[in-house]
Image (spheres, rainbow, N blue to C red):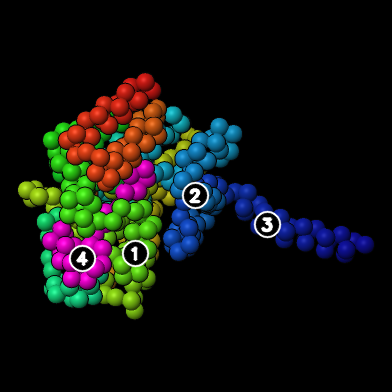
Amino acid sequence: MKCRLLALVAAGLMLSAPQASRAQQTEIVIYHYQSEKRYDALKTIFRRFEAENRDIRIVDIFKPDTTITADVQAALAARRPVDIAGIAGRNVLFMSQNTPAVALNQDAAQGLFLDNYQPQFLDVGRRGDKIFAMPYAFGTPIVYYNKDLFRKAGLDPDLKLRTWDDIIAAAKTIQHNTGVAGVAHLAAGNKDYGTMLMVTNAGGQYLNADGDRLLFDSTEGIAGLQLWQDLAVRHKVMPVASDSQWMAAFFGGRLAIYITSSAALRQAVQQTAGQFELGVASYPLFPGRTKRRVPNSGAAFMLYSPAGPRRTAALKFLEFMSRLEVANDWARESGYMPLLKDPLRDPAMQRYVDEFPAIMPVIAQMPDTVSTYVWADKGALEAQSIVAKLIDDLWAGRGTASELVPAAVRDGNAVLARGH
């Protein structure tokens, strides 16, 4: 009986040891919207971090990118743990103002990792001298084109597509000589992001810093949107469709040039392999301008841990992900753009560029990529719907940009003003 009792005690000690060890770990909960191969890449980073920090355990929660902002708010309201959340850039201002987000540089010493980033990428979360978001999944718009269609149309497949004039000329030639649609430019998210790109690259400003006033009724903003209309109405080289339809047409060889996020680069390389030779180039310069300026797409991490061990652990993870080799590994495996200063000082990234030169336009465009505009917390969805209708009207030829834009901006600002 005594031997049996000793055996049970020993077994109990063996069972309780791992539980005790786990009880000593600090658990942090990270919300994200990464799926499939990107999720695999993110999980690899989680496991690497845990291997280096045995006293920290990561619980990750996937939510779709369309609902993650609401899901995080619901979790916070229900007092469920949220330590880090991947929030779309356009929603960071709202989340920093309406949820208990913690400034990453609240403790200057713990926030030193922010200095690793390209300075303009931090603007998405900058509120005065506080920074509420760390970039982690940014894309920049680039040009994808079908070199086989260029050859078929009698064009040099390595033709420099530096400007919109170059793009339009090539699209016209291809459409005339092959019958294939010439070009399309992503719209994305209520046509909000596409409008932002066209306006900003033309030298205009889309929103004010507080996100509660539309400003693209300027000369530059109108010119940018007139160009987008001209692709469909005047030059007739852009079929009016949705992003998913344009993407499918491009991969199917029915669209010669598609301008969309660099986040699609890995997918584009894989889906065009064996179908046609893929070309990539930086986003086109607007006519008369010598420098491109394009807002990023994508998401940033925000911090929600309460003061204490969880916040310390969460900041340690963010610092880990901000290391050059870790950030570059994530960029390579996820397909998002590199975010740290001078990413090619990492030999592994330089080797990657040598082996995968298609990524070079993305890296070259890093200095031209600025922080995305962020919307205020009230009236944004209704204002975005007004922007979407404006673009539909432009593509339908219901008026020129100079005729339609001022009224749309006025109506959008009236909606935003009512929200405050």
Residue identifier under label 2: 64
Q: Label 1 amino acid?
A: Ala
Image depth: mark 3 or mark 2 in front: 2
Dividing the picture into quarters, in which one does residue 388 lie? top left
Mark 4–mark 3 distance (CA, rounded to whole Å): 70 Å
Image depth: mark 4 or mark 3 in front: 4
Q: Residue at x 48, y 58 (%)?
A: 35
Numbered mark located on residue 17 in the image:
3
Dividing the picture into quarters, in which one does residue 280 lie? bottom left
The numbered mark, 3 or 1, whose residue comes first in the sequence reads 3
- Residue farthest to the bottom, as pictured: 274
Q: Label 4 amino acid?
A: Gln
The numbered mark, 3 or 2, whose residue comes first in the sequence reads 3
Q: Residues within 10 Å of mark 1 (few under 14, many from 20)?
A: some
Q: Secondary structure at mark 1?
A: helix
Residues in magenta, as a range: 167-191
The numbered mark, 2 or 4, whose residue comes first in the sequence reads 2
Mark 2–mark 4 distance (CA, rounded to whole Å): 37 Å
Q: Residue at x 51, y 48 (%)?
A: 63
Q: Secondary structure at mark 4?
A: helix
Image depth: mark 2 or mark 4 in front: 4
Q: Secondary structure at mark 3?
A: helix
Q: Position of residue 159 (x, y in %)?
A: 13, 69
Decide if residue 179 is in sight here: yes
Residue identifier under label 1: 249
